[in-house]
Amino acid sequence: MLVEARVHVFYLHHYGAASEWRDNAVNIFLAVTSSSSIAAWAIWREFVWVWPALIAGSQAVSAVKPFLPYNQQRKIVVSLSDAFQSICLQIEHRWYEVSEGLLLDQQIHEEIIKFRGLLLEAERKFMDGTILPRKSKMMDLAEADALNYFATYYPVGDSQ
């Protein structure tokens, strides 16, 4: 469960970064095309068809921008990632007792159910009906990040 939760944290981080990049790319495109196209059209008349196309494109992007999901997705995944990160720390805190055999099976089961409930509660709170498309490459990155995380903080083998 700890590994799964940590993978989700890394996945949400990658998702948020990609959403932010896309939102910034759209904003930069709009800023550059709206401020430079008219000036460029006046200066370089040899590519007459390019400048009206850029202006029309920027107007179209500007019109659909409120419907693009990137900015909203970024806000959702940042909030959800923060909540999951906090829950992961709670799970890691309890992991010591589990790894040392200090808890009975029933107690471990109760902890798992408690933490799954917290994860579900956070998801419901921040996702609010939003469905994020699954991105396989981001999941691969998240799984690799989790492996690195656990290799760093929970190394396996004799290091004594």
Image (spheres, rainbow, N blue to C red):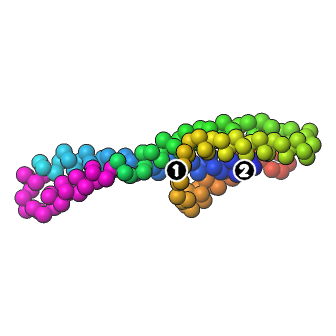
Is 55 displayed left or right of 120 in the figure? left
The one nearer the camera, 124 or 76, is: 124
Residue that numbered label 1 is attached to = 130
Residue 88 seen in this snapshot: no
Q: Secondary structure at mark 2?
A: helix
The verdict on residue 68 being magenta is: no
| First to last magenta residue range | 40-65
Q: Where does the image place residue 90, in percent across and percent down from the top left?
A: 73, 36
Residue 3 — which label?
2
Report helix, strand or loop for mark 1: loop
Percent position (x, y) of residue 91? 75, 40
Residue at the image position 73 percent from the left and 46 percent from the top: 116
Q: In the shown orientation, is residue 101 left or right of residue 27?
A: right
Residue that appears at 24% across and 47% down: 32
| Magenta-drawn stretch, dominant element (helix, strand or loop) | helix
**How crowded is the residue under tag 2: few (<14 C-alpha within 10 Å), some, or many (20+)?**
some
| Position in image of residue 159 (x %, y %) | 83, 45
The image quarter containing residue 98 is top right
How far apart, in angstroms, are the residues tagged by discs 1 and 2? 24 Å
